Image (cartoon, grey):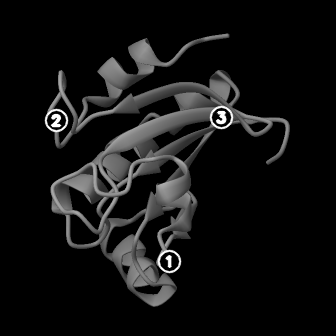
Amino acid sequence: VYGQKTLLFFSEGVMCQACFQQIQGLQEFGAQLHKRGIQLVSITPDSPSDLEQAAQQYGITTPLIADDDHRMSAAFNTLGKGMHSDTPGHAFALIDKGKVLWYRDSWLPPYREMYVQPKQLLKEIPTT
């Protein structure tokens, strides 16, 4: 929804179980994000059909974007920053009206994390 902040989560997609566990974890904190005026959208390098199947398997109800041409991942400079050169890293971007307000790449130093505890992530996301 335009006019609402959006937390983008870039991940390696269906081949990465930790990525979908991250989406599930963030989804559980959806009410807290909503209170702060933030919606969650996850972006993966998968085809729409593979993504739809994984969403059903993992019970994902938050929006998912199939970035199978990698254009969004490349635009946010996360492509090749993860475990594989052809997929996005584990990155988060808080955007509002097209402006990046905050960015955290979880796979790059100093973090080097496959999974970020949602409570920790909520602490790091700016409130303004």
Question: What amino acid type should be assigned to the residue bearing mark 2?
Answer: Glu
Q: Secondary structure at mark 1?
A: loop
Q: Quadrant of residue 127?
A: top right
Report the side of 84 relative to 36 (left or right): left
**Location of residue 53 with respect to 98 vertically, above or below:** below
The residue that mark 2 highlights is 113
Q: From the top left corner, tell me how far across and down residue 81 is, in percent.
A: 27, 49
Instruction: Write the residue at 41% across / 13% down.
Output: 123
**Quick one: quadrant of the C terminus?**
top right
Q: Earlier in the sequence, mark 2 or mark 1?
A: 1
Report the side of 108 relative to 78 (left or right): left
Specify few, some or many for label 2: CA neighbours under 10 Å numbering under 14, 14-19, or 20 or more.
Answer: few
The residue that mark 3 highlights is 95
The residue that mark 1 highlights is 69
**Location of residue 113 with respect to 15 vertically, above or below:** above
Instruction: Write the residue at 25% across / 29% down.
Output: 117
**Location of residue 35 with respect to 89 vertically, above or below:** above
